[in-house]
Amino acid sequence: MMTQSSATQRGSEPADVQFNTDRTHAGRWTITFSNPPINMFVPTTIVELGALMTDLEADPSVKVVVFQSANPDFFIAHLDVAKAAERPEVLGLWRDFVLRLSSAPVVSIAKIRGRTRGIGNEFVLACDMRFASRQSALFGNPEVGVGLVPGGGALEWLPRLVGRSRALEIVLSGDDFDADIAERYGWVNRTLDDANLDSFVDALVRRLASFDRETLGAAKAQINRFGTPTAAEIQSSNDLFFPLLALPGAQARRAKIRDIGYGVPSDFELNFGRYLPALGRADDDDTDKAVGGDKGELLIEGDTGKVHSKSSIRAFVGIAPDMFAVDTVAFHNLQNAFYKEHRYDGDSFLRHRQNFFNNRNVTAIVLEVPNHLIGKGTVHAWATVSLYGHAPEMQVSRWGLPLITHLFLNDPGNQEVKETYNKSVPSDDIALLSGYIADFTHKMATYAGSVMNPEEYGKQTASRLCPITLPYELGTAAAFDLAGFNGRPLGDDVVDVMLTLASNKSLQGGVAPDRNRIRTEFPYFGEPYSKEEQKNVVPWHPRTSR
C-alpha cells in the first residue's frame, strides 16, 4: 500500500508530495524521497517531514522505517539556502524533526545511493543506522566552502560518531567523501556493493520487525543516553546559520556558484566538493565583477593581423579561415521538415553534402592566458557582444555553445526567444530557456523515434545544456563530443554532435572543418583563404548564416 504523509491528507496536492510511504509490510515503512531534478531540500520538504513524523509517532504498529531516494545520483543534494532564507523558521522545524526522529521508539534506517550533502548528511546522521552503496554514495558538508557553517546537526552528530579530528576534517574541508572512507570513519554502519544493498537492508529490517516494538524502543532510548545531541546544542549551530549567510564573504562565494550550475543537474552539483577551492578567497569578489566599456584593466593591445604578447598573455585579432562546417541546405531541410511537416529528416544530410563555410574567412579574436593565471579546476566560458557607447551599453549577442539559437531556439513562430537568449546571462538560462530546449528536443526525439520517453530525454538534454556555457577542465585535453563537453578544439565537428544530441539519433552531416588550416602554434588558425581559393564562393546571405 502506497500512501502520502498527512501533509497531503490536510489539503496539499498529491503532485507536490515529496515523500511516498510504502506500508505494504506489517511493522515496516519504506519512505522514498523525490524532489526532481536533484532532490534538494526546500522549506516545504521540512514541513512535510514534520507531518510525516507526526504520522509515524501516531502509528503504534510501525517498528522500522527505511528512507531511500528515487534519484540514483542524489540521495539528498543539500538545502536550497535562498528559499530557506525566505522562511527562516524552517530551521527550527528541522531541529524538532531530527530530535523527534532520533528519540522515536521506531528504528530509522537510511539506505543511501548517490550524493548526500549538507542537510542531507544531517538527515542521515539523525537516522539510527546508515547503509551505503560502495559504488555511488558520496557524503559531505560543504557549508564552510560557501561561507556558512552546518546548522542542522552535523556539528553535533559528527564528533560523536567519528571523533573530533575527523569531524574537523569533514566540516572544515567541505570536501566529498566516498562510501569506503565514510565506513572507515564510522560515519555509516556499513558500505556494501550496490547489488547487495537492497537485500542486506531488507533482511535486517525483517529481522528487526520480528521483535517487539516496546523492547526495540526501550533499548534505543537507553543507547541514546550516550550518543545524541540535545536541542540546545543543535540550536546553537542553528542560530549561526542565517547571520553568517548575511556576511559579505558568504554573499561573495554564493554569487560565484550561482553561475556554475548550483541547484540544477550539472557537473558542479555532481562534484560540489571539488569546486569549492576554485571559488577563491571570500574577500576577493570585487576582482571578479565584470566592468563595461573601457573601464576594465588593459591587458594587451596592438595592430590587427599580428600576434602580440605581454606578461605571458598572447593575443591575435585578424582574418582567419572559418573552421565551422555545416551543410546549410540539409540543415534547413531538417528544420522545415520539423516545423512544417512534424517529422524527422536526417536523411537530408545524405543528399547534399556541401559545406557552406568551405573556403570562407572570418575575423578571429584569439586570447591565450596561461593556466596559472586562472587557477585550477573547471572554467565555464561564454561571451557577449554589446553596442558600446549606448547608455547603458546594449548586449545584442551571446555565445556559449554552438547551434543554440539556430537549432534549439529557432521556432519560426517564436523568434523572440532568440532575443531573450542574446540579451540574457547564463544564470537566467534555467528559468528563461530550458523549457524551450526541452520542448524542442522532446519533439525531435519523438519524430525520430529514438527514445522510449522523449519528454524525459528533452528534460535531460535541457539540463545538460543549461546554463549555456562551454566547460573546460584546465590542463586537460580538449574534446567536444557526445560523451561530454570539455572545451572545443578547432577541428572537432561540433555540428554533428549537436544534431545527434537534439534527436538522440546518430547524425553525420557529411562535411567537416578543414583541418589542414589548423596550426599547432598560436594563434592556431592557419592562413586565411586567398582570393584565388575563394573565386567560386557564393557571397554570404543572412538566410544562410549561422
Image (tube, grey):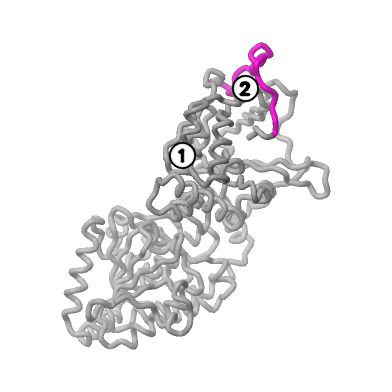
Q: State the quadrant of the N terminus.
A: bottom left
Q: Which class describes the residues within 10 Å of circle 2: few (<14), some (14-19), or many (20+)? A: many
Disc 1 to disc 2: CB gap under 8 Å: no
Using the image, determine if residue 178 lies above or below residue 124. Answer: above
User: Residue 61 occupies which quadrant of the picture?
Assistant: bottom left
Determine whether 310 is above or below 1 in the image. above
Instruction: For mark 1, give the secondary structure.
Output: helix
Dot 1, crowdedness within 10 Å: few (<14), some or many (≥20)? some
- Residue 270, numbered label: none
Q: How many marks?
A: 2
Instruction: Indicate whether 458 appears above or below 382.
Output: below
- Residue 321 spot, x, y in % from top left: 62, 22
* Callout 2 secondary element: strand
Q: Which residue is mark 2?
A: 321
State left or right for residue 308 relative to residue 487: right
Callout 2 amino acid: Pro
Quarter that holds the C terminus: top right
Labelled disc at residue 500: 1
Residue 243's image quarter? bottom right
| Residue type marked 1 | Thr
- Magenta span: 520-542
Residue 338 versus residue 83: which sits nearer the camera? 338
